Amino acid sequence: MHIDLHTHSVASDGTDTPAQVIADAARAGLDVVALTDHDTTAGWDEAARSAAEVGITLVRGTEISTRSRGISVHMLSYLHDPADPDLAERNEVARTAREQRARTMVELLSRDYAVTWDDVVAQTVPGTVIGRPHVADALAAGGFVADRSEAFARVLTSDSRYYVPHLAPNTLDVVRAILSAGGVPVFAHPGADQRGRVVPDETIAELAAAGLAGLEVAHRDNSPEQRERLTRLAKELGLFTTGSSDYHGSGKPNRLGENVTDPEVFEEIEARGRLAVLRP
Ligand code: AMP
Ligand code: FE
Ligand code: FE
Ligand code: ZN
């Protein structure tokens, strides 16, 4: 069984439609795939139809941006009730704030680059959760950078004068909200220290005590040293570990199925989640 539990579509900052992500996952030989767009469940229905068509098992999820003592933490939630008022409201607030923040970044950029908000919107489809990647795409479309990666490396770094942080709720609160919505919380790429500071062991212990279920250990942004540390921590704290691609289409080099999750862990996620896993 090949199981990839972290992918993005045009509902957030992937470049493929949900149907394309699912069809490509089947073509890549995956048996189970999770769609986990940032702060939204907008891609779920299309993904579910596509999964039934191409004969692949779908796990519905969301990746929620949070912050813990100033450190960015991405929290995956699997199989939560999308209608849970608290979680739905939190994601709605996050999406609105993200748009405001992206508009501010475009204002700052427009002093030095000929980019407008319309240029950014032109890089999205209706309903896309607009983030820095779409601002990057607008810069690429304007010929100011070659691609998304160059925009992130040269213009949109978090220490650049165009960068504006986005609103991010407290990690512990989000873990609790995910649990009350029947979701299974898994810490995404917890050792991605190239992107910025990562949380210390004590924070992960604190999250585990609050009900965190797992750590995404096999992810290309976790170095071998980090993976070793996270594997040890997971054992100590009784957390399961997952592996995933964090596929973003052509927006990132990550390939579907480049990291995978053990079937036993998938079964545990299914047993713990409120929503059903969708089998063809
Ligand atoms: P934001 O949350 O809007 O600040 O944007 C961060 C998102 O951009 C992350 O979730 C990644 O998916 C994406 N991202 C980060 N670094 C890069 C990069 N170097 N190239 C492409 N996408 C990136
Ligand atoms: Fe992303
Ligand atoms: Fe992430
Ligand atoms: Zn992701």
Image (tube, rainbow, N blue to C red):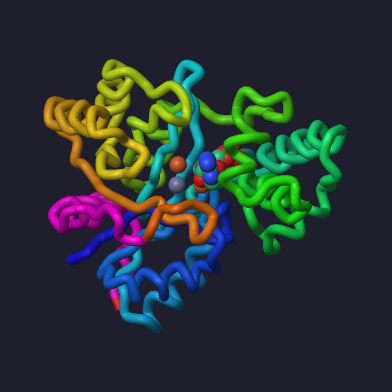
Instruction: Please tell me which residue lies in front, 218 or 202.
Output: 218
Q: Is residue 238 left or right of residue 132?
A: left
x and y percentages locating residue 22 in the rendered image: 41, 70
Q: Is residue 143 left or right of residue 3?
A: right
Q: Residue at x 73, y 29 (%)?
A: 162
Instruction: Please tell me which residue lies in front, 192 or 112.
Output: 112
Q: Is residue 239 left or right of residue 49?
A: left
Quarter of the picture holding the C terminus: bottom left
Q: Is residue 268 left or right of residue 32?
A: left
Placement of 21 over or under 182, stated as above or below: below
Q: Residue at x 68, y 63 (%)?
A: 125
Quarter of the picture holding the N terminus: bottom left
Residue at the farthest bottom position: 53
Instruction: Please tell me which residue lies in front, 172 or 8.
Output: 8
Instruction: Please tell me which residue lies in front, 195 or 125.
Output: 195
User: Is residue 169 visible from the viewing direction of this image?
Assistant: yes
Magenta region, residue range: 256-279
